[in-house]
Amino acid sequence: MFPGEVFANTADFDTGIRHLLPRYDEMLDAIALCLPSTTKAVLELGCGTGELSLKILKRCPDAQLVAVDYSPRMIQFAKKKIHAAGYADRWTGIEADFGDWANHALELGESFDACVSSLAIHHLSDEMKLKLFQRIGESLNPGGVFWNADPILPESPVMQEIYQTAREEWTLQQGTTLAEIRDKIGKSNPQGYSSQDQLATLTSHLKMLTNSGFTTVAIPWKYYGLAVFGGFVG
């Protein structure tokens, strides 16, 4: 398994992640809502099973979306879902490591109006996160936007306990437990530039974005240890 695939059985992902992470759909909806409905060229880094792709294609009727993921099983799962929804002509899935793109060793097309990601970038080291943010900034058209949804590093041991309690209470509300969910989680190995969780604080992420040339940074959504953050280029 690659980092980010989470569940041993890909078919368990869409249900399992909604049990594991509080307000998963609300988080992805926040990204989609932060894209202008007139957005035309979108790059998605780490598309997983295609849930965010679907929300963006529905939100932006003229968008062409290039989706990247290094997992062949995720790309195939997402492709079937996208095609079944009738968006085959507006979605292109590419099996690749976006870390290579960050290092200018991979081309993904021309410039984009928007770049998005969910539950993927936190698998990179801080050094690679910064390189990726710089590459994203370089690839966005003037006025372009970048939004990322990811878990964040707790600011203190006290906050870590609070974030953990919030997740435990959420899973109980879904009629399950973290232990039951974790029984379905597979063991992943490092792949390319990604490995196990390499979280950074929200403050660190915002500094990286500012240092990468984003003229405005923002946090449109946050729920305990999960956040949607990003910004705009001039």
Image: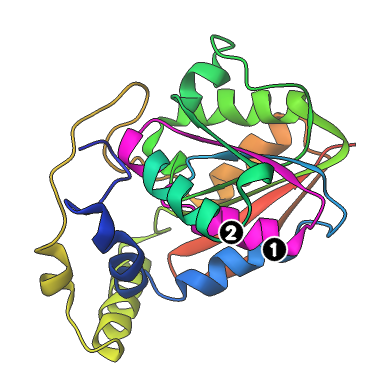
Mark 1–mark 2 CB contact (< 8 Å): yes
- Give the quadrant of the N terminus: top left
Residue 137 appears in the picture as rendered: yes
Q: Secondary structure at mark 1?
A: helix
Q: Residues within 10 Å of mark 2 (few under 14, many from 20)?
A: some
Residue at the spot 75% in from the left edge and 23% down from the top edge? 138
Q: Residues within 10 Å of mark 1 (few under 14, many from 20)?
A: some
Q: Residue furthest top?
A: 105
Residue at the spot 62% in from the left edge and 62% down from the top edge? 55
Coloring applied to the structure:
rainbow
- Give the quadrant of the C terminus: top right
Q: Which residue is mark 1?
A: 58
148 relative to 23, above or below: above
Magenta stretch in the rendered image = 48-74
- As for residue 66 lying within the magenta part, the answer is yes
Q: Is residue 88 left or right of residue 80?
A: right
Q: CA distance from mark 1 to mark 2?
A: 6 Å
Relative to the observer, which residue lies in front, 219 or 26? 26
Task: Give the amino acid type for the residue marked by disc 1 in the picture.
Answer: Lys
Residue at the spot 29% in from the left edge and 71% down from the top edge? 164
Relative to the observer, which residue lies in front, 119 or 68? 68
Q: Which residue is mark 2?
A: 54
Res 189 → quadrant: top left
Q: Secondary structure at mark 2?
A: helix
Give coordinates of residue 71: x percent, y percent.
34, 35
